[in-house]
Amino acid sequence: MNAKERKKLARAIAHRAEVNKDSKLEKRVAMSLSGCSARVYKATMSLPLRSKEQASADNICLPDVAVFNAGYRKSAETVTAR
């Protein structure tokens, strides 16, 4: 490992330590304010049992797509996608 790689690794370790320190502090503050741990809060939090999926614009199926994609099959009527 050369000097550049060692310096890069040291910076990454320092960055991860800073991020972990912030998240640990945040968890401690949240636990002291709420009186319960994050796991208990998550377990008691009510979530909707079923959520309705929203169709996005890029995955809406067209009614005749299967007919055009089945070009290798023989059909009674001739269908082209031109």
Image: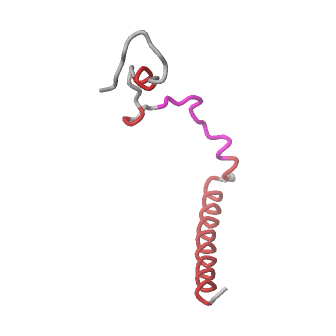
Let me know if residue 47 is in the magenta part: yes
Relative to residue 4, is residue 61 depicted above or below?
above
- How far across and how far down the image is residue 45, in percent? 62, 40
Left or right: 66 in relation to 39 = left
Relative to residue 66, is residue 45 depicted above or below?
below
Q: Which residue is rendered at x = 65% and y = 57% of the image?
A: 31
Let me know if residue 44 is in the magenta part: yes
Depth order, front residue of 18/75: 75
Query: Based on the displayed image, in which of its 4 quarters is residue 13 positioned?
Result: bottom right
**Quadrant showing the C terminus:** top left
- How far across and how far down the image is residue 50, in percent? 56, 28
- How far across and how far down the image is residue 64, in percent? 39, 20
Q: How is the image coloured?
A: secondary structure
Q: Which residue is rendered at x = 56% and y = 32% of the image?
A: 48
Left or right: 31 in relation to 79 = right
Query: Based on the displayed image, in which of its 4 quarters is residue 19 positioned?
Result: bottom right
**Quadrant showing the N terminus:** bottom right
Identify the residue at the far bottom of this view: 3
The main secondary structure of the magenta stretch is: loop
Identify the residue at the far top of this view: 76
Q: Which residue is rendered at x = 47% and y = 16% of the image?
A: 74
Relative to residue 15, is residue 50 depicted above or below?
above
Count of marks placed on residues: 0
Q: Which residues are magenta?
A: 41-53
Depth order, front residue of 63/7: 63
- How far across and how far down the image is residue 38, in percent? 66, 52
Q: Which residue is rendered at x = 44% and y = 32% of the image?
A: 54
